[in-house]
Amino acid sequence: MFEQILVNGLLAGLIYVIMALGFTLIFGIMRIVNFAHGEFYMLGAVVVLVLFGQMGWPFFMAVIAGGVVSGLLGLVLERLLFRRIVGDEMAGMIMSLAIGIILQSVALIVFGPAEQTVTRPFSGTWSLGGAMVPWDRTIVALCALAIIVVFYIFLKFSRLGLAMQAVAQDPDTSSLMGVESGSVYAASFSIACVLAGLGGALMAPIYTIGPYMGELPMLKAFVVVILGGLGSLPGAVAGGLLIGLSESVLATHLDATAALIASFVIVLLVVITRPTGLMGRSVR
Amino acid sequence: MKRTVLTCVALLALLSSLWLFGNNYVLHIATMVVIMAPMALSLNIMMKLGQLSIAQPAFMGIGAYGAALLTMRLGVPPLLSMLAGATIAAAMAAISGPVFLRIKGVYFVLLTYAFSQVVNLVFQEWVSLFGGNSGLYGIPKFSLFGFRLTQVHHYFALGLVFTALTYTAMRAIERSDIGAIFESLNENEMLSRSLGSNALAWRTAAYTFSAFVAGVAGAIYAFYIGFLSPDPFGFRASVDLIVINAVGGVNLVLGPMLGSLFIVPLPELLRDAREYQLLVYGVCLMVFVVFLKQGLVSLFQSPKKGVRA
Amino acid sequence: MNAPANSKGHVLEVQGLTRRFGGLTAVSDVSFQVERGEIFGIIGPNGAGKTTLFNVIAGHFRPSAGTVTFEGQDISGQTSDAIGRLGIARTFQAVNVFKEHTVAENLRRADVAHRCHNPWAWLSHRNSAGRADAHDVARFLGLDDSMQGEAGSLAYGLQKILGIGMAMMVTPKLLLMDEPAAGLNSSEKRMAADLIRRLRDERGITILLVEHDMPLVMGVCDRILVINQGKRIAQGTPDEVKANPAVIDAYLGEDYEFA
């Protein structure tokens, strides 16, 4: 029983981490709350629906395509729109809200409100101790883990990654030292969208695909990021796993909605006692 | 002065002709406008402080369910239950305010989002009290000193009176010392606080007031529609309010009023093309954020502000 | 640490004050007292920690260790607005006024901000007279001719003086001044020094200032605290400090004249 709870929690948690990483990246670097983040997740899933479900592409190629499409769209939107309102936090939030609404409505118009499914690329389960682990969720978790590791390496060891960290810490000094914040913003936003898109693409066969499917993952990302600290990448990882595990524990004793309420309440309590989250920067 | 008198007369003429000649359909839309206008004003108060609150519809819901249940289950007269429901909403704002408003703007958004989600989930899950997703039926009509409000005309009048009251109150506050204090806090918080201004206390007061307004609007909605479900009090509603404020303009109190006038009838006009309604919302919002940040109201403003004494 | 009773006329007592930012210790175990009616200066080379020390006292940062006591009351860790209500006012290094309003309105707003500091205070005191009179303050500062002028269009030096005026509107017992000479030319600096002396002599305000400008500090302060690398290295009268070898050492390589 215990192993099952642990496994379920980790599997869910890893996807939350992917969503949260992108969300917190955008905030940490551009100080924008991306209300459209769930829609980029949906976009990744939709790409898988079309390429894998309808056109017969190999699953992993469709997943990568999902990430790429999301990332490209993010790049375009950042260059065209977000660039105009840098610094204005409220305008950024409203802008991302507008984009989310537009993406959702386009999906609604093109695909209709009904949810669709794709056939699962993997099936069967294997056992880990006392737990039954579905193969498809395992693959998703392994991919998520790989993505997180690659992202971490990128951040720590590439020029762009280091530039991103610099801009997140201190945009003015960074620009004095020759880091062009414009390209860092563009890169961050599109990478965050890639992450969301990959998350949605990987999860496409697990649940259903529909125009509203991004709402719950975004909600989870919010919760994780509040818990872990806005702008903190380690916080996103810690928060994601923590939320995944606590939800798994709560779900055995309460139903899904009560568990959701409980996780919100926990988060509210955390924020009350430690406003910047578990690992956020201190603010007076 | 002449302009104000003329505007008032024109407004009165418009409203009276609406009342006398409008059919039930038009009056229903008008009633929804005057219920949502105070909601938009409620959000406007917070946006003027630079805080985007996603909690306003939740406060509306608390006022709505509170008033409905007090009247239905405890036989409290509707006017009293309306005020009581709004007071419960205000109390929740007063309690959560000092915690939520302490932290930077963005956290506030997320916290009000979390708060609003919890409230909605409670409305959905506590079926015995709130009726869950299938809803709370059979809310009695509003009555004032023995007079029962049965027709849409009555509710239009009720909503209009409340809208006018809220608008007047907000304008009065704006012109008073309180307005100067808020302006000082917004313009230069560090300076104001160094002079002793308790930013947190003032923000909490604004939040509480905004919750009270939302609560009353919710109660009016409950008595008007006669039926409640958690649907109108969720994130969607917040999006509507944000669109209204962005389109109408945040800086002047008139902004959300204009915004409500334009945006609230939209779902009805686009009834046959519901998917497009969402698209229109999104595009409107985007256009206004990018090109017309001050909102519709700026089209009527004189271009140069003189030195304010 | 317990704050001792205010028997000696200390307006401000700082004991063992430390402030850390992550791995960096900006202020380390600094202690000093400011006597009533004193003009007390804090100096130190660039990056010495004076600004951080100032900001801890002003309530912008919590101390990591140590205490700040005002008139016998422990105020360590209180917020900047709470400190503003206790009778401590501050001025800012860069100009901080309400630029789009008149000088008169700026002074009025300072009074309103203080008197109606929260909604209950507004309810009780909204119609009361303020503790200071705006015209009196303006006359004291030489601003009475500019009362109807827009604050943002005043000369830089006058805007800084308006900042002092706003602080005066709350009738402080202690005035914290953050680099009062910053951005002023030499004749304005002389006027600033005069003004600081008059604030103490004519209004009885105790003054604590942080400053880079040596002539001003040496000319105006009764006692000076010298900070370097977050630690106290000397304290005394201007003459004592000027002659202190540790102080001279700290400033070696910096372009300062002690005269």
Image (spheres, coloured by chain):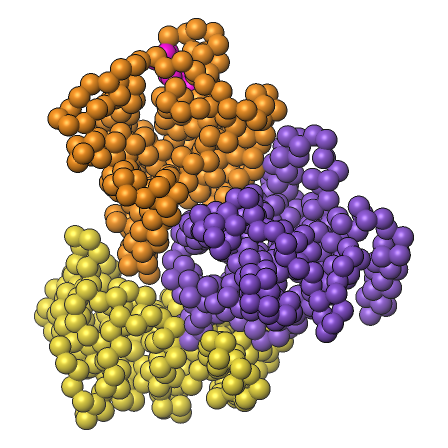
Chain colours: A orange, B purple, C yellow
Q: Residue at x 64, y 42 (%)?
A: B288
From the viewer's perspective, is residue B242 above or below residue A67? Answer: below
Q: How many marks?
A: 0
Q: Quadrant location of the C terminus of chain B?
A: bottom right
Answer whether residue A126 is visible to the viewer in this image: yes
Quadrant of residue A223 in the image? top left
Q: Quadrant location of the N terminus of chain B?
A: bottom right
From the viewer's perspective, is residue A112 above or below residue A246? Answer: above
Q: Residue at x 56, y 47 (%)?
A: B135
Q: Position of residue C216 (x, y in %)?
A: 31, 75
Q: From which residue to which does the magenta span run? A: A59-66
Q: In the image, is residue C109 part of the stretch drawn in magenta?
A: no
Query: Please, what is the dominant secondary structure of the magenta stretch?
Result: helix
**Nearer the observer, C185 or B154:** B154
From the viewer's perspective, is residue B141 above or below residue A265? Answer: below
Q: Position of residue B155 (x, y in %)?
A: 74, 59
Instruction: Please state if A231 lies on the left or on the right of B124 as rendered.
Output: left
Q: Position of residue B274 (x, y in %)?
A: 66, 32
Q: Residue at x 19, y 74 (%)?
A: C67
Quadrant of residue C154 in the image? bottom right
**Nearer the observer, C144 or B211:** B211
Quadrant of residue B42 in the image? bottom right
Answer whether residue B206 is visible to the viewer in this image: no
Q: Residue at x 15, y 27 (%)?
A: A130
Instruction: Please state if B211 lies on the left or on the right of C191 as rendered.
Output: right
Q: Position of residue A32 (x, y in %)?
A: 44, 42
